[in-house]
Each structure stands twice: as structure tokens, then as C-alpha cells.
Amino acid sequence: MRIRMLIWMLVCLFPYTAYASGGQEWDKLDRISDEALQMTKNQRFEEAKQLLEYFEQQFLQFNAREGIQSMDALHALTVTHEGAVKTVTASTLPIEERVNQVAQFRLVVDAVQAKHQPLWKEMKETIMSAFAGMKEAMEHEDEGAFQQSFQQFLQRYKLIEPSAKINVEPERFQRVAAHISLLEAPAFYQLDANQQAKELQQMEEDLEALFADGKKEAAVPSLWWVMTSIGGMIVLTLTYVGWRKYRGEKEKRIVQGED
């Protein structure tokens, strides 16, 4: 096993507290991650990798684990850092994918210590624009355009997913995850147009809530209500499909009997 992984595992074994001091050190880590992202955007990949490795050295030197508020945040930081280091100089990967990996790490670094408006929330407009494309395609019953917009939405959402999970209440985050799981399932495309429209409307409201501040949480439906609604639609869909299959087989037997 590589030394780097051993070091990160050792860090995970020690207790840590909420961020109380060392603000200047964490600001430096924040700047390093931002510089790594800028280097990646400028296709200076070797320099970006050096900065990512320097980040790890400084993280351990500053004992920056004291600034991590939860194990989930530490895990997100570790995973996105590893992903950025592995992909930034991978010449077989598209440049966009390498930039996205480093950007994902950059957003996590900011989310770990953000006290007010984290950077990932600034991506609301670009994510909601992709979602608007999904709604428009669904209204025009254009499944090809819907899939294209959905994939674009997923690509943008995955950038903020680890950092959003750090700053947002689990229930609010899980609501969006439940909607995405439904849209990825074949059952969604067997729903009638009205049910699909209702699902997208609820998903839009939950996405808006994801980017909202905590004071608006009370106005958001509970996770149980959302999961029950989604589960109900799936059951109805499967029942309807089964009934149609039964009806088709019955009609086929009648026709064959007449023949």
C-alpha cells in the first residue's frame, strides 16, 4: 500500500474537533487548491499535480484535521483529493474530465471550512438551467433531448455532490438523491405524462431547497413523503404494466381460440 494512503488512514484514526483555530493555515490550503484548479484549466497538469501533492504535505504539517467537522467531510476530502491526483495527469482522459475532478476537490476544500456561502452554491444557475432543459424536453415528449439534458444535469450535479453533502442536512440531500435514482430507473419512463410532470416539479422544489439556507427547511416536504410518493408511482407503474401484459395475453388467447 502506498505511503500516502497509510498517512491518510492514520489521520482518520485520531479524533478531531470542530474548527476553532488555525484559520490562516486553512486559508493557505484553500489557496493551494484554487491554484491547482487554475493550473488544470490552463492545461499545466504537472504543475497542478505538484500543487495537489503540496496540499497534502501542508495538510499534515498544519494538522488541518482539526478543521474537519465530521468523518463524512474528511472522507470527501480524502476521496476527491485522491481522484484529482490520479486523473490530473492522465493523458488518456479528456481535459474536461480532469478539470472536473480537480474542481470537485476544490469545492470540497471550500465546503469544509465555509462559514457562510460555500462556492458550490454558485453553481445553482448552471445546474438549474440543465434541469430546465429536462422539463422542456419532457413537455415536448422528446425522450432523446430529455436524456441529453439529464446527462448534462448529472455531470454538473456530480461536481457539487460531495461538497453539498458536507454543508446540507442529510434529509435535504437525500431527497435529491431519491429523485435522481428514480429518473435513472426504467420505471420512470413507464409513468404517464402527468406523473412524470409531478415528479419533475417536486424534484425542482427539492433542488431549490438544496441551494436555500437552513431557514427554509420547514417549508420543504419530508423525506418520508417524497420516498412514499416515488415508491407509490413505481408500484402503480408496475401494476399497470402487469395488467397490460395480462390483458394482451388474454386477448391473444381469445383470438387464437377464434382461429
Image (spheres, rainbow, N blue to C red):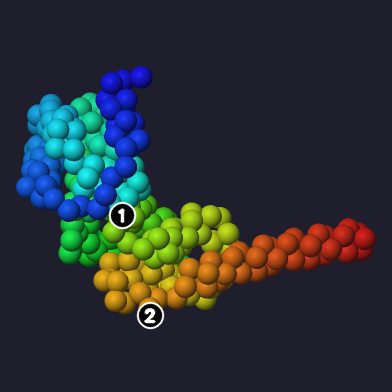
Residue type marked 1 = Ile
Secondary structure of the residue carrying tag 1 is: helix
The answer for how far apart the CA atoms under marks 2 and 1 are is 21 Å
Does any portion of residue 213 appear in the rendered image? yes
- Left or right: 247, with 43 as reference point: right
Question: Which residue is found at the position 22% from the left and 65% from the top?
Answer: 125
Do the residues under discs 2 and 1 have CB atoms within 8 angstroms? no
Residue 50, position as x, y percentages in the image: 12, 28
Residue named by callout 2: 219
Residue 131, position as x, y percentages in the image: 34, 64
- Left or right: 184, with 66 as reference point: right
Mark 1 or mark 2, which is nearer the start of the sequence?
A: 1
- The vertical placement of 134 against 7, above or below, is below
Residue that sits furthest to the bottom in the current view: 219
Does any portion of residue 38 appear in the rendered image? no
Q: Quadrant of the N terminus?
A: top left
Question: Which residue is found at the position 19% from the left and 41% from the top?
Answer: 64
Residue type marked 2 = Ala
Image quadrant where residue 54 sits = top left
Secondary structure of the residue carrying tag 2 is: helix
- Left or right: 13, with 32 as reference point: right
Q: Quadrant of the C terminus?
A: bottom right
Q: Which mark is residue 139?
A: none
Residue 66, position as x, y percentages in the image: 22, 45
Residue named by callout 1: 166
- The vertical placement of 226 against 43, above or below, is below
Few, some or many C-alpha atoms within 10 Å of disc 2 (few <14, some 14-19, many ≥20)? few
Residue 130, position as x, y percentages in the image: 30, 61
- The vertical placement of 178 against 77, above or below, is below
